[in-house]
Image (tube, helix red, strand yellow):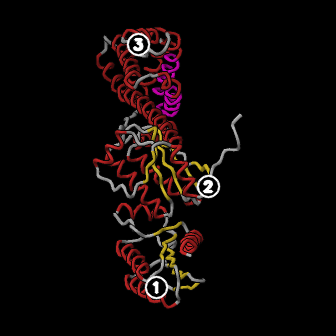
Amino acid sequence: MEVPILKQGDVLIATFQAALSDDDLSQLRSGLVQQVVRFRSHGVIVDVTAMDVLDSFASRTLREIAHMIRLRGAETVIVGIQPEVAFAMVQLGLTLEGVATALDLEEGLSYLNQKFEKMH
Amino acid sequence: MAHLEQTVKDMKDTGARNNQTLELPRSNVASELLRELVAHLRQNRTQLREEWVTRISETRLLTAMTKDEIFAEATSVYDSYVEALETGTFEALQAYARNLSERIIPRGVETHEVVGIVLLLRDVLARSLFAKYQTDFKKLNRILDAYEPAANRIANTVAVGFVQERERVIRQQQEAIRELSTPVLQVRERLLILPIIGVIDPQRARQLTEQLLRGIRTNRAKVVVIDITGVAAMDATVANHLVQTVEASRLLGANVIVTGLSPEIAQTLVTIGIDLGKMNTVGDLQGGIEQAERLLGYKVAALGEPN
């Protein structure tokens, strides 16, 4: 199942659904990286609230997305990681280094807005 | 007959519970003998009880209790004992054992003492049977055949009752300690503190992490101050766990500040080689809260001179 990418102001929002295949994830990565420049967005939010597990491929893809978006001139924030998922990820050594995280969509938006204000 | 069925049922129940199969063959002859035995024990109640209490003080059991208390308990135990022998049901005795344990465990009575006094009673009664039937060995044999399995069951029931009660108390206390030990407190909007006091074992560490991560979600916290001033030392496993907790909190979008690291803990963290870029540490709780306020954009100002 493909992940829909929504545009909200100058932010792109991608919400993960439960079961996602590795192909879906790769597709999402290229979709986001293309659209962020097309829409001149300054931020990207990836919402993983629905995920009750994030394996190493998903974590790596999230990190790649964040770094590629940075290279394309925008900021990424991952939101909605569940407490159990967070601890499981850390135990597997998947700590999403260098990637911004926030509690939920609202927090993610306010984080991006703050960043954006600072830039201007 | 109904009585007998009840007995058999009880035995199966208790047998299954205690994971042992102790079947009492209760023919009519055996129950006849038991009746005679019970009558004997009733008749000599005062004397046998006296002797039992004397033996208890001689062997220095139940030193936590006064002589009068021992005598009072001994009377109840004796009567329950005889009743269990007579009816072959152990529920009343079990209930009494539990009740007794509840009363004497807080006073520091040990398992060996409880088992010891029940075994003493068994021996005192057996001796009195020897004395009574010393002229008729065949009868003595049969009486003992009826008496021994029942007496062993009783000893077993009391001991198991005592140990179970003890375990229940221990479980209850562990639960209480666990609940008391991990408060997650909100001191300002979006600022939590987690003061940790005492020894952290891996189990408690896991529980702390769970509570903290949940607290971050429910309070929508952005900054968490973990104060470990009250923790003297931690081993490498727990230290690693602490680092993981900090990282997991970050994944939920919260900043963690650790305060009050003792020299020993600092040593442990350096020895396991943690990445200092991941850990934000401040000397004391006050400094930690001040830094948290700065992160949250608060500015604390004094309103003139203090009174």
Residue B39 at x, y percent in the picture: 48, 18
- The amino acid type, in three-letter code, at marker 1 is Leu
Helix, strand or loop for disc 1: helix
Magenta residues, start to end: B73-101
Helix, strand or loop for disc 3: helix
Q: Is residue B141 left or right of residue B198?
A: left
Residue B86 covered by magenta stretch: yes
Q: Nearer the viewer, residue B102 or B299?
A: B299
Residue B56's label in the rendered image is 3
Residue A112 at x, y percent in the picture: 55, 73
- The mark lying in front, picked from 3 and 2, is 2
Residue A97 at x, y percent in the picture: 38, 67
Q: Chain of mark 3?
A: B
| Discs 3, 1 touching: Cβ within 8 Å | no
Residues packed near mark 2 inside 10 Å, few (<14), some (14 to 19) or many (20 plus): few
Q: Which residue is mark 1?
A: A32
Residue A27 covered by magenta stretch: no
Q: Nearer the viewer, residue B182 or B153?
A: B182
Residues packed near mark 3 inside 10 Å, few (<14), some (14 to 19) or many (20 plus): many
- The amino acid type, in three-letter code, at marker 2 is Tyr
Is A53 placed above or below A38 here?
Answer: above
Q: Which residue is mark 2?
A: B298
Q: Chain of mark 2?
A: B
Residues packed near mark 1 inside 10 Å, few (<14), some (14 to 19) or many (20 plus): many
Q: Nearer the viewer, residue A119 or B153?
A: A119
Q: Chain of mark 1?
A: A
Q: Residue at x 44, y 37 (%)?
A: B198
- The amino acid type, in three-letter code, at marker 3 is Ile
